[in-house]
């Protein structure tokens, strides 16, 4: 009797699950967002793939875009200024660049808060004194730190590139509640379609030292490549180590197989 009741209860449970799965569901309030949201554009960088290497000329251009445009709102507090030597800047150039940043300090005589020119050992500072000041200046939105941005977002480099080049007017059929409000800007590559950051790039905004044309597309690619480096500055070493390990394993496997064949060759007939 107990087994019969248990079996009937199981059948009822399964039937209920099937009915629930087949019943039409009401549209989710997020369906409109999903409908208009776009996946990142395709982006190819020199650092892509297991054999990828950084294009240091592009990284320097990307740093120039960060310094002249992005650093007005975004910090890179996990990246030391002196690490710019790894992408081709000389030591004197790094020292000169460090001095262009203002970092928090303390007055040695009074102990009060003060500022000083940056040093190569400093990390890229935030342009705001604190989170409250950052939100007050950005329509209550907190500009994220860019140090690990390409690791923090799915398809990170492509996401950065798409976001920077994806600003556009809202489509005519966009629901009213999804349209950008005051201080917001429509961008289908942003998760909720609207963000507080105004389009940061415009053609010719930066004058590249190497003469490359500074189109919005080019600047977006360059700063995306630069942020790949800030998120994983030792990537090239990791690639080289990985390739060396694979080669070692192939050789070790071959030697082990040949040793096995040599040891057991005369024993197979026994």
Image: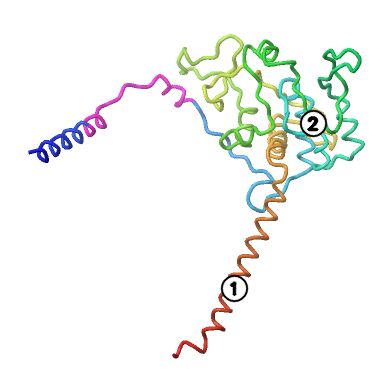
The residue indicated by pointer 1 is 254
Proximity of marks 1 and 2: CB atoms separated by less than 8 Å: no
Which is more N-terminal, label 2 or label 1? 2
Image quadrant assignment for residue 75: top right
Query: Is disc 1 placed on a helix, strand or loop?
Result: helix
Residue depicted at 52% across the width and 30% down the height: 38
Image quadrant assignment for residue 94: top right
* Residue 56 x %, y %: 78, 43
Q: Nearer the viewer, residue 83 or 24?
A: 83
Tell me the quadrant of the picture where the C terminus can be found: bottom left
Question: Left or right: 118 with respect to 193?
Answer: right
The residue indicated by pointer 2 is 64
Few, some or many C-alpha atoms within 10 Å of disc 2 (few <14, some 14-19, many ≥20)? Answer: many
Question: Overall secondary structure of the magenta stretch?
Answer: helix
* Residue 259 x %, y %: 58, 79
* 1 vs 2, front mark: 1
Q: Nearer the viewer, residue 190 or 168?
A: 190
* Residue 102 x %, y %: 84, 21
Q: Which region shows up in magenta?
A: 17-36
Image quadrant assignment for residue 167: top right
Q: Nearer the viewer, residue 30 or 217?
A: 30
Residue 74, magenta (yes or no)? no
Query: Is disc 2 placed on a helix, strand or loop?
Result: helix
Residue depicted at 60% across the width and 33% down the height: 152
Q: CA distance from mark 1 to mark 2?
A: 49 Å
């Amino acid at each position: 009797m107990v087994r019969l009741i248990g079996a009937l209860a199981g059948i009822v449970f399964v039937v209920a699950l099937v009915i629930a799965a087949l019943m039409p569901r009401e549209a989710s309030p997020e369906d409109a967002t999903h409908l208009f949201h776009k996946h990142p554009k395709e982006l190819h960088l020199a650092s892509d793939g297991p054999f990828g290497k950084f294009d240091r000329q592009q990284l320097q251009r990307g740093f120039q875009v960060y310094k002249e445009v992005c650093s007005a709102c975004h910090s890179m507090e996990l990246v030391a200024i002196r690490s710019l030597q790894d992408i081709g800047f000389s030591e004197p150039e790094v020292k000169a660049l460090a001095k262009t940043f203002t970092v928090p300090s303390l007055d040695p005589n009074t102990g009060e808060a003060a500022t000083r020119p940056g040093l190569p050992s400093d990390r890229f500072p935030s342009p705001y004194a604190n989170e409250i000041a950052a939100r007050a200046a950005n329509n209550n939105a907190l500009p994220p730190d860019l140090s690990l941005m390409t690791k923090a977002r799915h398809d990170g480099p492509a996401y950065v590139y798409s976001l920077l080049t994806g600003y556009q007017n809202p489509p005519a059929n966009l629901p009213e509640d999804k349209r950008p409000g005051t201080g917001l800007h429509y961008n289908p590559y942003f998760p909720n379609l609207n963000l507080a950051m105004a389009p940061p790039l415009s053609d010719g905004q930066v004058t590249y030292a190497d003469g490359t044309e500074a189109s919005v597309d080019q600047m977006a690619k360059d700063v995306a490549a630069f942020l790949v480096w800030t998120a994983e500055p030792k990537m090239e070493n990791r690639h080289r180590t990985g390739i060396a390990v694979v080669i070692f394993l192939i050789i070790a496997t071959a030697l082990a197989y040949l040793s096995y064949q040599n040891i057991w060759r005369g024993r197979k007939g026994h």
